[in-house]
Image (cartoon, grey):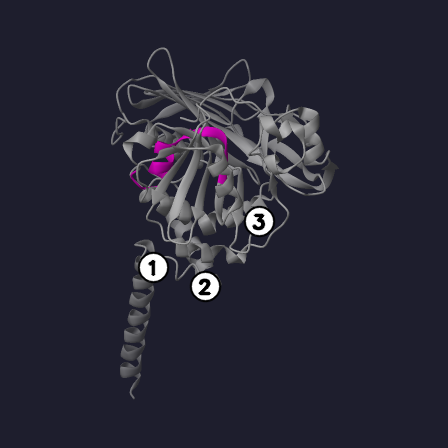
Amino acid sequence: MTKEKRIIEFIKTALIALLSVSALILAWQTGLFAGFIDSIPFFGSVAELVKGASTATETSGAAPKEAARPISIVVTNEDGERYGAKYDTNARNAAYDRISSILGEALGSASTPNEISEDEWREALSGTGVFFEYLRPIRLSILDHWFGVNLPDTAKDVFIRYVCIAFGEDKSRIYYQDAESGSFFGVDTASAAGKAQELEIFSGNGAMFAFETRVWAADSAPYMLIMPESGQHPDVIAAAASSADELLYMVITALGHSEEKYTTYYDGRGALVGVGTQFNINVFSNGKVFYRRTNELPLDNETIIQDTTMMIERAREIVSNTIIKTCGAAEVFFESAEYGADGSYSVVFDYYIAGGRMFLRDDNNAARIKFSSGIISEIELLSRNYTLADEYTNLLPEELTLAAAGGEFLLSYSDAGAETLQPSWAKYFWLAQGG
């Protein structure tokens, strides 16, 4: 073979390889190999790498994603073994990634809900199935949106904290508790009962519901998950996440002002101020950011959003492109949403780490994003970075804490400016609905 022919053959081979790789990436992005590729460790890692590279900056119009995950998950396999995931974030996320499709498919094929007795609800919790607990009540229509399904209209406005998918011999059913009324409901679903086989990889770890203990206080928090762990929880190292310049640029980019001319200066408070023709931003040394739209007209290519679920999605995008990038080992979850007296709609996010909620100084939130007339008008962010320390704090075991607290409690960390944060148990209560 001549040198020229070898060069031609080399070029042809390279083109074939390039086209093959392009086809594989396109097939993965369209979901053609979903499930199969993810089941192979090597390709699963490559898929995540490609996905991460292609969504470095999220934009409106992409498929919606969950803005919060369950704070605890329970899996009961066909042998009656129960696995609970609550404080180990990696274990909880691994379980959620594997079984969240069960919840999505069940919701997507749900029929009209019917009220049931609490005994039937508890029987469902004891049988084969999966259970998800959200820390704050969340509207079912929001879950509907995150999973891309269409629930019956009679269920969409219901707020829930607890939802269970139970597998029977012939069919599956969804069970949930209405967080407002306290009533329980069951819903038939076309989701295959054969999916129970997917739960066999989970082994029992002694997790139980509070009503299964002998603690009298369980009556006020019967469906709290009690973990049989030693009570050791990690300390957390807290620090400022970014410089003022970095935060300013990050927010300007996330809000779509990157093509707009603006000036910056430091004011008498030491805040970095950015002023454009349509916005004003103040960035403080402690990571606090205030953004205000000074022009009520939409930006170029900005969509006026009327649907509240889409406002939550847009808020999630902003959070994903700002404080999530620098929060370290913490997670940032959708906390609540509410209408203001002026007709505005505010979406709130908070930090979570090691299965615990982070309480910030002066009752601040990780993010509060306000919509007025369908566009973002104000934003408050607190950019913090959290890492898990090598030290642990011993806390009272959960059954004893349940008795001492006289009701539900949660793992908490308090970030008031100290470098090292220690965990503690906090009395649980909620003041706002989840959207």
Cα separation, mark 3 vs mark 1, equals 38 Å
Residue at figure coordinates x 39%, y 58% from the top left = 35
* 17 w.r.t. 255: above or below: below
Measuring from the top left, give residue 262's x and y in whole percent. Answer: 37, 24
Q: Which residue is mark 2?
A: 40
Q: Which mark sits nearer the N-terminus, 1 or 2?
A: 1
Specify the amino acid type for callout 3.
Arg
Measuring from the top left, give residue 351's x and y in whole percent. Answer: 54, 32
Span of residues in magenta: 132-150
Q: Quadrant of the C terminus?
A: top left
Indicate which disc residue 25 carries: 1
Asked whether the beta carbons under mark 1 and mark 2 sit within 8 Å of each other, the answer is: no
Indicate which disc residue 82 carries: 3
Can residue 275 be seen in the rendering of this structure? no
Measuring from the top left, give residue 227's x and y in whole percent. Answer: 64, 41
Q: Residue furthest bottom?
A: 1
Indicate which disc residue 306 carries: none
* 177 w.r.t. 54: above or below: above
Q: Is residue 387 magenta?
A: no
Judge from the rendering whether residue 392 lies leftward or rightward of residue 122; answer left or right: right
* 14 w.r.t. 300: above or below: below
Residue at figure coordinates x 55%, y 52% from the top left = 80
Of residue 135 and residue 306, the one placed in the foreground of this image is 135
Q: Which mark sits nearer the N-terminus, 3 or 2?
A: 2
